[in-house]
Amino acid sequence: MDAIDLATLLRLPIDTAAFLLLFCRVGAVVMLLPAFSEDGVPPQIRLVMALGFTFGMYGMLEGRVAPALGSGIAMPLLVMGEVAVGLALGMIVRILFSAAAMAGALASQQVGLSSALVADPAMGGQTPLLARFVGVAAVVTCMAAGVHHLWIAAIFHSYASFPVGGMPPAADFAHLAISVMGQATALALSLAAPLILYGMLFNLGLGLAARVAPAIQVFFISQPLNLLLGLSVLAMTIGAMLTAFAHAMTTFMQDGWTL
């Protein structure tokens, strides 16, 4: 065995440990990212995607991960810290992405489909039909617009802000999560604004009709009309809603997220 083979053999355990440590953060983020973490994606595919991302980033990030292995910190502590950072980063993106589902839920309430529920594993239970539809459409729009590239780039840049071996800043993450939750709520309200305005005008007209002609069964007449007009308004505005959502997600990943 020559010197080159011996050096390669001695380097192999360090490279393996660095790869697994990198995989802890990348895999935790991928486990929560929209589109990649959907229940419709088999777990084996998600594992392969996480390994593929780790392989792709290893050559660029190995120099930031390997020094932590010689810092004297126990390997279990490094693993727990990387998993915690990865989960926090993925959850931040997940919170903002929930604005699409919230906008769909508001639209369902205005249209009169709030009682039409379907299973939504991403939200952890049953959600209105339109909320599920808008959420899936938002995933497709973000993938088509290339927003998922920004998610992957955020994983790479996170190693500059949160070096390996340091304790995750829980207070900063909590403050960021609260801020993002407020941004998600405001974004959901702005996306559903046309449907909210429609609901106000329709209910105002319905109330005036009931006052003018109390003998008319307003509910049986208005419910089909509400569905027809509400879905028509949604069909006319869904393109602008999804485009605005993708733009807001892009702006947040580029400017709003301090990494």
Image (cartoon, rainbow, N blue to C red):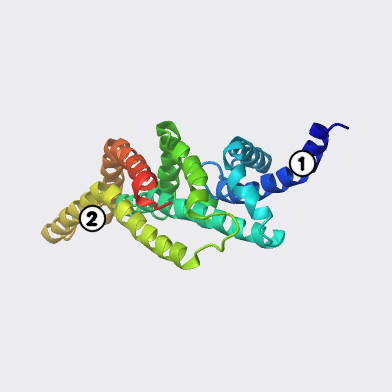
The percent position of residue 200, horizontal first and vertical second, equals 20, 55
- Position of residue 45 relative to residue 224, above or below, is above
Residue found farthest to the left: 212
Element marked by disc 2:
helix
Query: Looking at numbered disc 2 in the image, what kind of residue is underneath it?
Result: Val
* Residue at the spot 64% in from the left edge and 54% down from the top edge: 68
Residue 117 seen in this snapshot: no
Q: Which mark is residue 218?
A: 2
* Crowd around label 1: few <14 · some 14–19 · many ≥20 (10 Å): few
* Residue at the spot 58% in from the left edge and 59% down from the top edge: 84
Q: Disc 1 marks which residue?
A: 12
Closer to us: 178 or 68:
68
Residue 181 seen in this snapshot: yes
- Give the side of residue 77 with respect to residue 130, left or right: right
Q: How far apart are marks 1 and 2 (CA)?
A: 76 Å
Q: In which quarter of the image is residue 55?
A: top right
Query: Looking at numbered disc 1 in the image, what kind of residue is underneath it?
Result: Leu
